[in-house]
Image (tube, grey):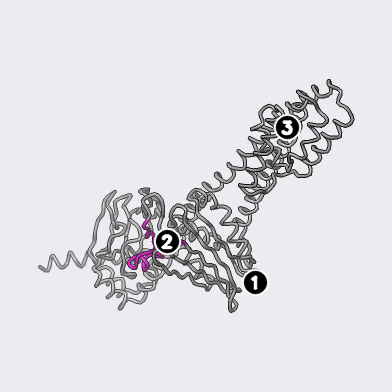
Amino acid sequence: MSETMSIVETRKAEIIRELRALPVLAGVTEPELARLAEGHEHRFVTGEMLAIEGQPADHFGFVLEGTIRVYRTVGGVENTLIRHSDPGPLCEVTIMTNGTHPVSAQALTSGRYLEYSIEEFWEILSHCPQVRTIVLDFMNKRSRNLQTADFQQEKLASLGTLTAGLMHELNNPGTAASRAAMQLRENLNRMHLLAKKFSEKEPSKKQMQCLWVLQERAMMAGRTMCMGSLEQADAEDAVAQWLDSNDVEESWRMAPALVASGITVDDLQCIKDEFDGESVNLPLQWLEAMVSSMQLVGTIEESITRVSDLVKAVKSYAHEGQGENDTVEINESVHATLMILKHKIYEKEITLEKQFGPNLPTLHCACSGLNQVWTNVLDNAIDAAPHGGHIRIKTWAENSELFVSIADDGPGISPENMTKIFDPFYTTKPMGVGTGLGLGIANRIVTEYGGSLRVTSEPGNTVFVTQLPLQYNPN
């Protein structure tokens, strides 16, 4: 018996010496080292799981040696957060938060750690103040690292959403401009041939004056006339009938272009008066080509403007909060995010109702991340709203605070889920659709600015209200 005790004491003394040599335990008293040395020595092998994400901790450990990989699984993909070999606490975050492991830990090499029961862990923290300080320092550092990892993970998820939106939004005006440019080239070639034929007929001064007046009319209109559907249909029918009665070729194609430029049957009368028979076709084809070309130029201008507006929105989104003390126009900030997410709204044919408060005061703060709040809340609202549903956005100021309300008419959030929506990695979306980080990140950002993110929900009406003080500098 004494020989066994001697072996145990000898081994304990060896572990104390080993603990004393660890930089992380520098300055810890001998009694506290002796208490740590009472832990059960556990040897692990390469590949062994030391902690499994989502499971509760059943013991505390203090790593003596070995390399450990810490990772999370998001959408079925393992994302390594830490790869380290420094001695130190193991599982302290999970025990002290009374939750489940936020990460998995796997041995990359063989190694050892001292193992303690949960009760022993609390006893060590109660009676070993220096060890307690070390454990708490590790816990704070790891919690911050996990928060940073959460934030970066969500930024990557948001980047994917935004990239898809940008590609979609840039593709539409780009395609429209390219198609309009190609048609404009065809029109110019057609006008070149028509001008040649027209000059060969040596038109009279009155004929040229008639054509010039109509051309001026088309040039002044520039863009497509804004008309109601019924009014436009009646006008096109009237022009098409006039063209048919005068044996004009392709009246079905010419009528919409002429009406869109504001030309009426009365305007066309001079063509009939000054040109006879087959010669009516030539000036009308020239006029239609001119009108069509002006409309195509308008399409190209609108496409370029759309791209410019989108670039401006992206620059606003990316620039927001880059200064230590920045200013943000809330309406512009929300609008920039809407521009980037517009493709998702269009795809689901959602009706967007905006009620931007006029003359809102400027928000003064270190505003990095506010655009991510709107992105996360709006993206969730779009996903929740049914096809053809509604999203309502409202901004206002009250008592030195700014408010942004985002509501959708989706199925709502159940009472059991309401308490979990801000929890990291909690999501009701299908795997691969959401990370479960968005609302938690949004809530954290708003809280850091001294504000709040509140939610109320019932079927057909889920409302997220962001409240922000006009001036706040987060630590």
Q: Residue at x 71, y 44 (%)?
A: 223
- Name the residue tied to disc 3: 289
Helix, strand or loop for disc 3: helix
Q: Residue at x 39, y 49 (%)?
A: 432
Name the residue nearer the viewer: 49 or 98: 98
Q: Which residue is farthest right?
A: 205
Residue 419 on the magenta span: yes
Q: Which residue is farthest top?
A: 200
> Looking at the picture, how far across and down is residue 5, in whole percent?
15, 68
> Is residue 307 left or right of 445 when viewed as pictured?
right
- Name the residue tied to disc 2: 146
Residue 187 sits in quarter: top right
Mark 3 and mark 2: Cα distance apart in space? 64 Å
* Residue stretch rendered in magenta on the structure: 408-428
Mark 1 and mark 2: Cα distance apart in space? 35 Å
Mark 1 or mark 3, which is nearer to you? 3
Name the residue nearer the viewer: 260 or 402: 260
Amino acid of disc 3: Ala
Q: Earlier in the sequence, mark 3 or mark 2?
A: 2
> Looking at the picture, how far across and down is residue 449, in whole percent?
54, 70
Do residues under tags 1 and 2 come within 8 Å of each other at their CB atoms?
no
What secondary structure characterizes most of the magenta part? loop
Amino acid of disc 2: Leu
Q: Which mark is residue 76?
A: none
- Name the residue tied to disc 1: 361
Amino acid of disc 1: Pro
